[in-house]
Structure formats: C-alpha cells, structure tokens
Amino acid sequence: MGDAVTTPPTLALRDVRKSFGPIEVLHGVDLELRAGEVLALIGENGAGKSTTMKILAGYQGATSGRILLDGEEVTFASLHDGEEAGIVMIHQEFNIAEQLTVEQNIFLGRELRRGWLLDKKKMRQLTRDYLDRVNCDVDPNARVSTLSNSDKQMVEIAKALSRDARILIMDEPTAVLTAQETDVLFDQVRALKKAGTAILFTSHKLGEVAEIADQVTILRDGSVVHDGPAAEVSEDEMATAMVGRDVSDLFPDKPDTPPGEVMMRVEGLTVPGYAEDIGFELRRGEILGIAGLIGSGRTEAMEGLCGLRPASARLVEIGGKAADIRRPKDARDHGLCYLTEDRKLRGLLLGMGLRVNLTLQALDRFGGFLIDKAAEERALDAAIEAFDIRAGQRDVAVGNLSGGNQQKLLLAKVMQTEPSILIVDEPTRGIDIGTKQQIYAYLRNLAAQGHGIVMISSEMQEVIGLSDRVMVMRSGRSAGILSGDEIGEDAIVRRAMGVGADMNGKVA
Amino acid sequence: MTSDTATPAPKRSLPSMSLLGPVIALLVLIAIGASLNSNFLGAANITNVLARSAFIGIIAVGMTFVITAGGLDLSVGSMAAFIAGLMILVMNAALPTLGIGVPIILLGMVVAIVAGIVAGLINGFLITALGIEAFIVTLGTMGIYRSLVTWLADGGTLSLDFGLRTFYRPVYFDGILGISWPIIVFALVVILGEILMSFARFGRHCAATGSNEHVAHYSNVDVNRTRLLTYAMLGLLVGVATIMYVPRLGSASASTGLLWELEAIAAVIIGGTVLKGGFGRVWGTVIGVLILSLIDNILNLTDFVSPYLNGAIQGVIIILAVILQREAKAKG
C-alpha cells in the first residue's frame, strides 16, 4: 500500500456538506478513492453512506464542499455527467428493467447498431463475455424478471463492466448474495482492482470488509470517524467506531433455566413444492433457530404453517389443542404470528405513515366498525418508545425511514397482534449492528417473558448466538435439530449441505 | 441517534397541491361561471347541476373504493343501462298484477339493487377468484351489458308504461324542502362513503390492498374479500343511481349510460384518488364530479365554445389532473 498513498486520488470529496431542508445530514465529509484500491464505506443505517455515494456518483449535488476528479474540481450537473466521467453506481435496489432480457438491459440506452438496425450478434457475444467474466451462466436472452436476486446482481455488475467504469460504486452489493456468490463477486472485484479501477462499496458484513477492502472509511452521524488502511483496524474496532459504543456483547446471554412446557407441536408439515414432512416442538421461553441454505424451504414452511400459503400438516398442536390453520386469520386466533423476511414488499406499506402501518395487522383491536384513531396514536407512542423508532416526523412515509427503523416498526406491527408464538424470518437483514443488538435483546426478552420464538436466519453468527435449539433444513426437509453445545458452525453446515456432500454449495 | 438524519428532506406523505388543486379548480370554475352568466348562481341552476351530478356522483363514490383497492370497473355505464332496461321490463310486466302504486315502484327498486349487486359480484368474482385483470373482465362485461340492453330493447327503446312513469316521476323531480331526491341520495351516499373510507376498517383495508396486496395479505387482510366487496358495493350504487335515473326519462336504450364509466373514473382521478390504488378520497371524488358537471353547465350557458366539445374538454382535464398528480408527487 505504500506507493498507493502517493498517487493522487482518482475521486475525492473535500469537506462536503449536504442538507435536506433545514437538516444537515453530512457534516464535512472527506473521502479519497484511488485507482486500484477498494474502499469500504461503512456506518450504521442513516449515517450518511447513501448520500455520500449519491454525491460521488452525481445523483445529488453537495450543499457545499468540493468534488475532485483526478485532482480537478468538478460539478456533476446530472447522473449522466457522472457516467461520462467513468463513474458507475450499482444500487441496492436493482436498477434493471424487469421485462427486458439480460442482453437488452446490459446495452440499454447504448444499443450497438449496424446502420439502422440493431447489431444483435455483436451485443449477444459481448453480453456472453461480460457474463463469463462474472461467472454467471444466465442466458443473455432470459427475461430479468425470471432471474434470482443474485443473478440480477451479477447482471448489474456485468452492466457496469460494459460501461468500462473507472470508478465503481456499489451500495451493499452482497446483501442479497449467498456466500459462494459473494466469493464470485469478490474475485471480480479483485480483477477490476488489478485493472486499475477505483472501487467503493458499502456492507454491513464486517467480515467482508476485512476480506476485500484496502481502505476503510467509517461514518457516524454524517461525519467521518475513522479513515485508514483496512489492515490496521479489527472488526471489533470497526463496529465500535460505527456505533459509538462497545458492541462486543452483540447477543444477550442464553438463559440457564430450562425452557417451559411445549407450546406448539408440528408434525408432518408439507408445503407442496417447498417443504415436506417438517416436524418440531417449540417450548415456552425458548428461541428455536431454523438454519439452512437459501431455497431450502424454511420461509415457505413457516408461511405454510401460518396459513399464508397452501400447506397441510398431520398435526399442529398449540397449547395442547389441535389447531387447523388455513388462513392468516386462523393463525392469529391461535396466537401465532409471522414476521416476513421482506419488509419492503411484504411487510410495510411504504407510501403510508407509521400509524397506518403499525395497526394494520391488528386493526380490530382499534375500535369496531369505525377505527379509534386516538387509540392508534397511543399505540404508536408506545411503540416508538418501546422499540426506539426514530422517525423524525410522525406522518413521514415509512419508505423514507432507514432500514433499521423500518425493521423495528415491522416488529412493533406484528407485536400488535399480541402473539404468544412469534416466527421471525431474517429479523436483522440489511440493518446496522446497533439495531441488530436491540432486536436480539428484544427477542430474548420476549422469550424470557414466556413467549415461544422461531427464528429463521441465514446469518450463521445470529443462529448460533441467539438460538437455544437449531433446526437445520435441507431441500425442504428437516436435517436434524441441534441443541446446547451441538450448536456450531460445522454441525450446521454439514447438515445444511448433507453430510459427505461436496462443500462448494451455497451456505447462507 | 443517527437514524432520523437519514430521512432525506422530511416529506409529508401527501403533497398539499394534490389536496388543494381540485378545490381551487372548482372555485375558479364557479367564478368563471358566475362572471359569464348571471343565472349561474341561481337556485334553479345549482339544483340542476347537482341533480345531474347525482347519477355519476353516486357511481363515482363506489368507483373510488374500487380504484383505491387497486381495481377498475369499466362496465358501470353499460351496467346502468342494462339495469334500467331490466327494471323497466319487470315493472311493465308486473303492471297488470300489481297496478300503479308504491309496491310496483318498490319492486323496481329491489330489482335494480339486486341486479346491481349481482353484476358487481360477477365482476368481483372473475377478478378475485379467477385472477383475471380487472381491465379485461370489466371491458368484457361492459360489452355484454351494452349488448344485452340493446337486445332487450330489440335495437330500439324500452319505455316505462306512461301511467307508471307519471307516478314514478317524483323520485327524480320532487324532494324535501326544495332539494330533489337525487341530491339527497347523493349526499347520503357521499357521507356514508366518506365515513367508510376515512374512519372505518373497510376503508383502511381497501387502501392497504391497493397499496400493496402482498403486505395486506401478510397483515391478515383478506385481500380477495376486500376487492370483491368493493365491486359489489359499486354494483349496488349503480343500482341506486339507476333508480334515480329511470324516472327522469322513463326509458332505456342502447345509448343509456354511455360513457358514464369515463366520467366516473375521471371524477375519481380528478378528486385526487390514485389511479394505481392505495389512496382514495371520497370528498375529492365529489369535487371531481362537480368540476365535470360545471364545465358542461358553463358550456351550455354560454356560447363561446360549442357544448359538443364538452367531451374533448373533459378529456383534457382528466389528462391534466393526472399530470398535476404526478408533478406533485415528484416534488413531494
């Protein structure tokens, strides 16, 4: 890295400030991106990462401060100017046309032509090349809407490759990728780096930052709190700098006392096409983790159990009585509630305010035929207090909240139904470490109060750190239940992959 | 600690221009009308405008719910024509047994309301249970009802028995304290609709369904039932509007209720309800209906522009309303 420091930065921010109305969200940010280097920009949700990236890429102007491109001050009047300068940004929410094919997307707006007609042959061949470079074997002719999330991410990267980006900015590129796909992405990042591209990325996974980044810039509350080589800062130090307090105790202690009586017994749960013959018991006061690969049918099995999709079961017993759950309402009548993994598409009405979202699932508790809005407001007051939801104004559309606050609101929303058994699916996906800690503490506390909790998670650390027992799923079936000291990464991975199977699969 | 600073530019969920726009437009129209013709603000003209607004208005209130829940119904105009035809046939047929009197009028009303609910349920069933696009289903039923009424009338006009017509007339032309029945019924429908939309669970469920049906489903909202109910309710209101309409002319033909769906949908959109669903405003719809009626009225009272261009002006206004909605949203 010694000589890298002497080269002038390809792109730099100098004392950049940004205000939205009266609120300043960036308080003088300095940042340097160099050719052939990977810079990780990390911080909690709401620390100002997205705004910083948007200013870098020309999506938004800075309120004050300078942007230096190769040492020269520039102003990007538009996104187009940014792209002209060789800056490509890949968004967290995909920026691809779902109904077009992969090839059409990659050349969207810059279609190659021969005379008046499209040069399909050449575009097909180049698309194939780009996809090969990212080890992605989707058909260039496939409609993007038919692709998995990870393939979409690869298409985005292929698109960036096709633009010959000098500077590549990626907003949480690995959030939707499995471990194996992340490896493929990182190989590609290393190749780009070698070719002299300056790369900036954000991630909540600090392990990845340590693995791939050369430099780390840490933002907190709109200011840079740390800046330096990645090798000189440990993951723990990064977390502490981001949160501003010690977060080594991420997970609350597991209770010493044995869990209570069986609250729910499930036998022979089958969701056609996704899960078969799943059985487990859930005891009062325990957190049962469900681990497994993405696509192993965890989500579908639990949605089936809660009446959200067609399913059958030999036996579902709640509180010692047989329960016949066919619709979400039946689940609710039995005190069973499911928190979806997809807060944006299935969890919250993004265009509506906090109050409407909070009470939607349990609207019958707020008045009869007519809604008691005062009671709703009181519930919102209580939820904001209990879950530490930071929303600024109360009538703000939920889509404008940060991911962590959305997740807390979603949790508050499902708790309005007063469930005795709570099934949470990826409860901390895409949220910052401080909020994670709050959610873990909340779930453990809920269990201690006598609730039963099932937690589906793809984060190994979370499964191990929070679960009292772990059910591992593989290809739609239960591959064993672990408890106590058996719970460990190795044991989970072996079951998730199938013992003796090759270990190259996707562990998520 | 950090999170609230991330919220870019504290937005209000509803841009104020979409709130005020229709009201301002209505006031401007009233001012124009008053300055062009001294009779404009006279009681006779106001009553006339409101009574004519009532049919479309009653239907548009139902349409507000359908659109808010993410649906659409193109069949309402044809449905009204069909129900009117059916009503006239049944009443004429029952005349020899029941004679002229209140019972036969009640029979006609029951026929209209039942036919409306059934027609709405058919639309709703095809859309929710079979999962066919609302646009396609109601485009289909629009053709079916229009054709059925033409067939019932054998290509001509179905006329209510003359004696019956005279007896039934007061339902359109009379009222209480000088306010005619259509206006009273319209007002009641609006008040009930506003309560249902803004203060009742059903309205919340409609908005949630139209906003994101997956979220609604995951939140224990019975999405299909909610949608089905909106179509049934719209059918019912089409029936009610027809009950008010039949005594006005006493006949039904292939051209009855022509383009009512256009006016009803236009009124809803002008009133600020979001075409894609998720947000609806019953009082906004009322303003939308009044704006459309006033334009028609002003054109008729003055001779600057031919009343034949009314449709063109309405079309321009609908498009303008949507553009304004979008601008307001982008600025929001």
Image (cartoon, rainbow, N blue to C red):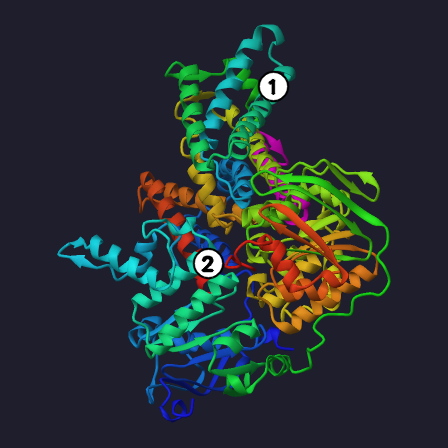
| Image position of A114 with respect to A313: above or below | below
The amino acid sitting under disc 1 is: Ile
Residue positioned 67% across, 49% down in the render: B199
Report the chain holding disc 1.
B
Is residue A108 highlighted in magenta? no
Q: Which residues are magenta?
A: B174-203
Q: Secondary structure at mark 2?
A: helix
Percent position (x, y) of residue A235?
59, 79
Residue A330 marker: none
Percent position (x, y) of residue A457?
63, 59
Instruction: Label the magenta part by its dominant secondary structure.
Output: helix
Q: How many marks?
A: 2
Percent position (x, y) of residue B292?
44, 44
Q: Which residue is mark 2?
A: A150
Q: Which residue is mark 1?
A: B105
Q: Residues within 10 Å of mark 2 (few under 14, many from 20)?
A: some
- Residue furthest front in the image: A500
Is residue B181 highlighted in magenta? yes
| Image position of B33 with respect to A447: above or below | above
The amino acid sitting under disc 2 is: Ser
| Image position of B27 with respect to A330: above or below | below
Percent position (x, y) of residue A508?
56, 60
| Dot in front, 2 or 1 | 2
